[in-house]
Amino acid sequence: MPFELFVSYRYLKAKRKQSFISIITVISMAGVALGVMAMIVVLAVMSGFENDLKNKILGLNSHLLVLSWDNAITQYRTISNQVESVPGVLGATPFIMTQVMLSSGNNVTGAVLRGLDPKSASKVISIDRILKKGQWSALAAPTGESVNPEPPGIILGQELARGLGVSISDTLSVISPLGELTPLGRIPKMRVFKVVGIFESGMFEYDSTIAFISLNQAQLFLGLGDKVTGLEVKTRDMYQAGEIGKAIQARLGFPFWTKDWMRMNKNLFSALKLEKFVMFIILILIILVAAFNIVASLIMVVMEKTKDIAILKSMGATAPAIMKIFILEGVIIGVVGTALGLIGGIGLCEMLDKYQFIKLPSDVYYISSLPVQMKAWDIMMIVISALAICLIATLYPAWQASRLDPAEALRYE
């Protein structure tokens, strides 16, 4: 064991005349441990919240959209095959999107109507995971000849169905404000649909505004012929969606353009990242308080060990060696506190993830318990920051100890 480390360890281990100094040392360790533990738990919860939000957004949205400046895509089957041949693309599905009015009894509300192909859509978006009642296959248009065929199917968000007062097997009217041209002028177009399913994405904004019908029925209702609004694309790596979108745009050329999920939700995730950074800075203050305790503790140790320092210098210890002794003493406090905080933080996160003993009111928040996701990078930054602060806190007391004059210290001994 090096000489400086041995002396530092003995100073921490030995019983001091002034027990108050030992108490400050313990408080310093506890402060570092508490700060590290708090930072690990808070950042893990915020990372879990961000990841959960991403999953809910991508439950109803694809990684990438392929659109046209003409606001409509013809020969979408051929274009879909071209998109799927781009490296990194796992699948593509056509969609139609428009705004409509939904009417049921005395209840009327606006909604976003999305037409999709249930067969190919399930390969691109997580529609099976969010459906609570009914089946996506029920969206298919009724087959067979009948004098009074059943209305085509529609699947509503849970909050939207609740607002309209409808459930499975109920009917409602879908009104398109675009309408159709008649000799009397343009009038709204209306058609009756039957509720065949209810989904719950966990996002109130989606559950209260979105309704699904089949792609064929959307084309018939809106009079689009064989056109669609665009293509939804799933990529192998969702974080590379922007780069893959550029490759798709280069292959298809004008008038096609792409929009990835990160650009569509840029403001939301930028706010989350900023909030996470601000919380990191705020929690650093806890460790800074502990660092001030380390400074106070080392200054009082230097005052208590003045005679010892003078003797060490008289025996040949250099100023850098004395400085190193007290730096190592502060570093040991920081390492022990950081290790305790690391164990406590990871353990608490594991318990939160496994037992979910902190419950949230589901009628207020879209989640019922705290989501937890520990990231190695976050933990590494916390440990490095804590150790760096503790190291910096030791420099001034250690420098003061190294400047001590042995003759002046031993004059009255």
Image (cartoon, rainbow, N blue to C red):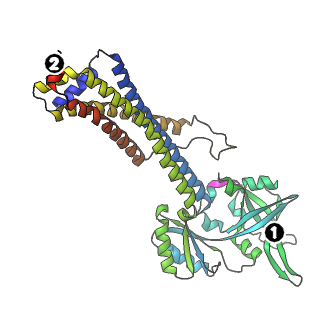
The kind of residue tagged 1 is: Ile
Q: Earlier in the sequence, mark 1 or mark 2?
A: 1
Q: Quadrant of the N terminus?
A: top left
* Residue at screen point 29% across, 14% down: 17
Residue 78, labelled with which disc? none
Q: Which residue is mark 2?
A: 411
**For this view, does 138 lie left or right of residue 45?**
right
Query: Where residue 45 appears, x then y in whole percent?
Result: 52, 43
For the record, the magenta segment spans: 129-133
Q: Is 130 contained in the magenta span?
A: yes
Question: Which SS type dominates the magenta stretch?
Answer: strand
> Considering the numbered disc 1 on the image, is that residue within a helix, a strand or a loop?
strand
Task: State which quadrant residue 37 falls in.
Answer: top left
Q: Nearer the viewer, mark 1 or mark 2?
A: 2
**For this view, does 84 lie left or right of residue 185?**
left
Residue 156 against residue 30 in the figure, above or below: below
Residue 134 against residue 185 in the figure, above or below: above
* Residue at screen point 73% across, 58% down: 156
Q: How many other residues sit within 10 Å of disc 1, few (<14), some (14-19) or many (≥20)?
A: some
The kind of residue tagged 2 is: Arg
Q: Which residue is mark 1?
A: 175
The answer to which of 228 and 138 lies nearer the viewer is: 228
